[in-house]
């Protein structure tokens, strides 16, 4: 299915947020995800379905100061 990931069109086979994150290689435990503008708690990733046209934002902390 086609979704937008961090403002970039992507094709994913995963049916859930958890599946898509693994497929897209976002495997760090220190990420945050928002689906269609709504924050998704990590414990809900496996039960959050994806749909054609969804907008996914994935954020990872940056080091520095």
Image (spheres, rainbow, N blue to C red):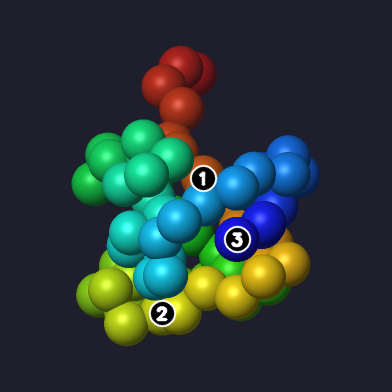
In 3D space, how far apart are the residues under numbered discs 2 and 1 (Cα atoms)?
17 Å
Q: Is residue 46 left or right of residue 49?
A: left
Q: Nearer the viewer, residue 42 or 7?
A: 7
Residue placed under numbered mark 2 in the picture: 48
The quadrant in which residue 38 appears is: bottom right
Q: Residue at x 67, y 57 (%)?
A: 2
Q: Residue at x 39, y 51 (%)?
A: 21
Q: Is residue 59 left or right of residue 45?
A: right
Q: Nearer the viewer, residue 53 or 39?
A: 53
Residue placed under numbered mark 3 in the picture: 1
Determine whether label 1 and label 3 are within 8 Å by CB: no
- SS of the residue at dot 2? loop
Among the two numbered marks 2 and 1 on one chain, the one whose residue lies closer to the N terminus: 2
Residue placed under numbered mark 1 in the picture: 59
In 3D space, how far apart are the residues under numbered discs 2 and 3 (Cα atoms)?
15 Å
- SS of the residue at dot 1? strand
Among the two numbered marks 2 and 3 on one chain, the one whose residue lies closer to the N terminus: 3
């Amino acid at each position: 299915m086609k979704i937008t990931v961090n403002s970039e069109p992507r094709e994913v086979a995963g049916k859930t947020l958890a599946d898509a994150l693994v497929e897209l290689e976002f495997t760090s435990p220190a990420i945050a995800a928002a689906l269609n503008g709504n924050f998704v708690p990590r414990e809900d990733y496996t039960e959050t379905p994806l749909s054609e046209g969804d907008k996914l934002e994935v954020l990872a902390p940056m080091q520095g100061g």
